[in-house]
Image (cartoon, coloured by chain):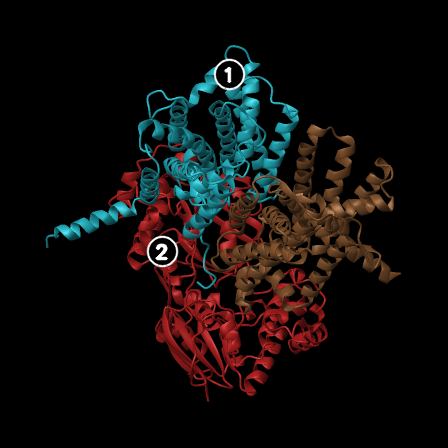
Amino acid sequence: MRGLATATGGLLRSSSFPGFAMMLLLIGVNAVITTGFLRLSSLVSLLNLITPLVCLSMGLGIAVLSGGLDISIGAVVCLVNVVLVTLSGQGTPLAYAVLAAVGAALAVGALNGIVIGYLRVNALLVTFATQSVAGGLALWIMPLPSGQLSPGFVEGYSSGTFLALPVALLVVLALLGGWGVLRLTPYGTYLLAVGRDEQKAYVSGIDTRRVLLVSYVLSALCAGIGGVTFSANIGGGDPLAGLSMTLNALAAVVIGGISLSGGRGGVLGCIFGAVFFALITETVLGASVAAFYQDLAAALIILAGVLGMNLLQRATAIADGYRT
Amino acid sequence: MIALQCKHVRKRFGAVAAVDDASLTVNAGEIRGILGGNGSGKSTLAKILAGSVRPDGGEFELEGEAFRPASPRDSHGRRVIATSQELSLFDNLSVEDNLLLSALPRKGGLFVDREALRKEAILALRCLGIEEVLDRKVGTLSPDQKYLLEAAKALAQDPRVLVIDEITSALYREQTEKVRRVLRVRADSGCAVLFITHRLPEIQEICDSVTIMRNGRTVGTFGSCEKNENELLAAMSGVDVAELVRVRTPLSQPAPGTRSEVVGLSGYVIPGFKERVELSVSEGEIVGVAGLQGQGQSALVRSLLGVKRPARYRLLGTDRTIASPQDAVRCGVAFLSGDREQEGIFRARSILENVGVVAELVQRKRVDKLAMLGKYNVKSDRATRPIVTLSGGNQQKVVISRWISIEPRLLLADDPTKGIDVGSRREIRRYLHELARAGTAVILVSSDDEELVELTKAFDPARVVVMYDGQIVHTLRGGDISTENIALHAIPRKARP
Amino acid sequence: MSETPTSKGWRAARTVAANRYFVPLLLIVVFFGLGQLLIRGYGSLPNVGSILAAASLVTLATVAQVLVVLSGGDGIDLSVGAVMSMGALLGPMMATSLGPAGLVLGAAAVMALGSGFGLLSALGIRFGNTPPLIMTLIMASVVDGFTLATTQGQPSGTIPGALLSIGRPIVPPLSWILVLTLALMAGVGLLLSRTRIGRGLFLVGSNRRAARLCGLPIGVTVASAYMASGAISAFAGYLLAGYSGGAMLKMASGYTLLSVAAAVIGGTKLSGGEGTIFGGFLGAVILTVLANLLLAVNLPSGVRVFVQGVVLLLVLVAYSRGTRLRA
């Protein structure tokens, strides 16, 4: 009994808990509001739709844990989408097209990582600039929405299963598994140290510049994978469609309990935050708010969520003895 | 066998020479104390050895081989480890992660070996007797536990040269004893230990020998039993040994109270400390606050401004609550900080802006700024240039004239002459005297005992209070005011219980 | 010892180079020179006038940005573009429904709205423990959503004729929009040099701790900067509607990045406390000339966005690197 109590206590105090609770709450609300919400087929299609945001949030979570921010992720999605659709439209085998697209994402991540980690420019502003670099490239490659991905690819994503699990779920689980493995390596600990205080981490003998480079590459990798699933969702190319995901991913990360000052929180929370997010925008708003008010409502919810989480974090940080 | 040799190490931060010419040689198996007052360069030297500060000059040798500490990783690689006075602990990591952060044990080349990590952590904690912190959150540990953890972290890396930077001030007697034993064991197995401290008894109890530093230079190296405490003090403060005798003259009686009280503290607790403080300062009085670093002097003066929390005390005869510096300034309280960069100057802004900020922007008074600058001898041909173009001394004079222009009732100063040239210091003292003669009460904290003596000994009314652990432990007046007396009362002779 | 003519020349050259406007002015000359080489009639007064007119809009956005960045504390306003778009859509709507004085009242109304959003940003930053970058990023979405909601996707009302003519030249190279912008710049400049809050802004941004210890009202000063930014951005949007002859949702979103880049190029330090309105103007002109060149050479919009991103990156690497890890 005591074991259960301490485990529950630990769960309640975990930083991902508020996000988890909010997610459950929203699932409950949706189950009531939307008829047929809990049917397997609608859950799976929701899952497919949500996965890009979940991937982006996980990557952004890593960047934020490192003490920075990556607002180029939406533009990376656009770039990946455009590269994938263009290459596959030109006849490149799908596997290579996907690799090239993800490779483009990694290049952006490396650029971010080098300018932030080695040239020591403010992360927020660097990724703001690379957002235009990646977005501009996407627009250049494909000025207007066009192209079509092979139906086989699209179908494979939306209805395919492997070991009885939908492809989208497997992608998320794979990323989560990757993060789990990473946490078991020294990098996982270094990441949290650098995020909390780069100077102290340096003094402790950590190569902080390399840790930052890796973090931004990983963030871009997750954005790249998210971009591939996003492409499967929309079925074609659109150079601007991914941009709005940046802010949603940011909100998901904050709701998921990751502290914007770095070093606190876990990627699991990002998943809860992303699900919460996507549920709000895809279903609740869709059902009950008039079309023209949806953007405003979504933005206000983000605002409330971020402000609320920041205030909550400040309170718990004081309780835990952190210096504010 | 010589473990470490440093020759002519130098380091400047801006205009200040933190380390001016430091050389020392330490043998393997030796515990060398590094003794020095505030600003003697001991911590900077430690950071240079640890690789986190880049030296301007100097040569280093480890066991005869050249050594260039280019980064903390570099120093760690050569097993030169230093503890950090500001603590390099992470409150978002577990105790075991903190302990072995620099050398996480691996499994299969790629993963952290959690079991080995835990075992090594327990061992590291056990040798300093703090196993109980193992599963606690670092942020909730008490200061003594944190410092021991910092020491354990350094020890866990099996150093060849270990630099311990002032950890004992936070420790209780038994803990210091444990540290002594652990260091002895390490030294006996070949490690060279540099033990930085300001506590004289520890030199004899813990160290084999001692190097004294003053003003950034290494002044001399002796066996730990060669010199007695007075002689060590003399070397640290640069005063002649013969003058270092305890002077027992009767305290001069304070003049009958014809001056009105400006600030009165009774039952006042300085944030971060436990004991209550009683202090009353009248118009035109100068009170110097002395003592070792971190004994509450700075915290006292800052708390009166209401910087972190509201402060309740008697100001100008009435009980007031000062909730913010804005309140304080409105009541005529001025604050002069020694940390010009962070708290004094507005770097890129012009000299004129820097002078006029309080008078013109906060109190809405018109001030003839150029006249003030001229009066305070601030040398600058064009007052519209950024204040950073001035020397440190002149910058501080601009800041002082900023406060003088509002004719404050109370001036609180926290080490205002830190890092300033001798000539400017003399001038600043003169301005403070003038200010006091005009009726301002002055409470001035300083780590420079000579400064306090010069400021107070020839002025009436003036006194020096010596603080330790948040309390005023002694008051010196008149003929009693001397650097020797300050030093005598500042350093604890008996160890803490 | 007398100076030789050459050493006197070097000394003069060094003083000129040390002037803070040297690099921006040099860049303008270089880009303009390129324009002259590539395009016929580039240096003609009418063409210069149209460049300056376009630059006016970027200038207004930059002035807004400079004020926020000056306030320090990692201050930045990523909602400039969104508030501008709001001004472009809602301003003319309000102007046409506010009667005869509508032109001016519409401007005033939309500026009040903009400053309201700015105040919300400032409150969220101060009391919500949220960094300015994040707060204003979210605020941009809120403003966009608000604009969509209030216009119901259908910007109604025509744009007042007077507003439509602001882009037209008075006497080349002057145009009404340029005159209005210069007037606003002068007004802001006066506020910054004559009022207590304006003068205090530089000090608050330069060193918050010292400013606090001096008793300066930090909260009010910072909030004023964000409110002013909102008001000026809204006004810029209002003029944008006239200049473009129409208004669309999110039409001004690109101005945010331009305003940050122009502020930095013009000498405003992202750490706060340092910067000038005039420098912002120069930065805006540089970026407009650059964009104009790219457009004239018929480069697709994607390339233009790409180049803007690269330019900002280069500017950041050149001017905004942080402190070293090893002192």
Q: Residues within 10 Å of mark 1 (few under 14, many from 20)?
A: some
Q: Residue at x 45, y 76 (%)?
A: B229
At 72% from the left and 74% from the top, the residue drawn is: B115
Q: Colour of chain C?
A: cyan
Furthest residue in direction bottom, as rendered? B1
- Find the distance from the CA under tag 2 to the CA under tag 1: 73 Å
| Outermost residue toward the top in this view | C100
Specify the amino acid type for callout 2: Leu
Q: Is residue B191 placed above or below C315 in the rendered structure? A: below
Question: Is C19 in front, or is A248?
Answer: A248
Label 2 vs label 1, nearer the camera: 1
Asked if disc 2 and disc 1 are in contact, CB closer than 8 Å, the reply is no
Q: Colour of chain B?
A: red
**Which residue is pictured at 48% across the width and 38% down the height?**
C68
Q: To which residue does mark 2 refer?
A: B455
Q: Position of residue B278 (x, y in %)?
A: 54, 52
Specify the label residue C207 is tagged with: none
Query: Which residue carries the number 1 mark?
Result: C160
- Quadrant of the image for the C terminus of chain B? bottom right
Q: Secondary structure at mark 2?
A: helix
The one nearer the camera, A101 or C99, is A101
- The chain letter for the residue carrying disc 2 is B
Crowd around label 2: few <14 · some 14–19 · many ≥20 (10 Å): many
* Amino acid type, label 1: Pro
Chain rendered brown:
A
* x and y, in percent, of residue B382 in the image: 26, 43
Q: In this view of the protein, can residue B316 be seen by the observer?
A: no
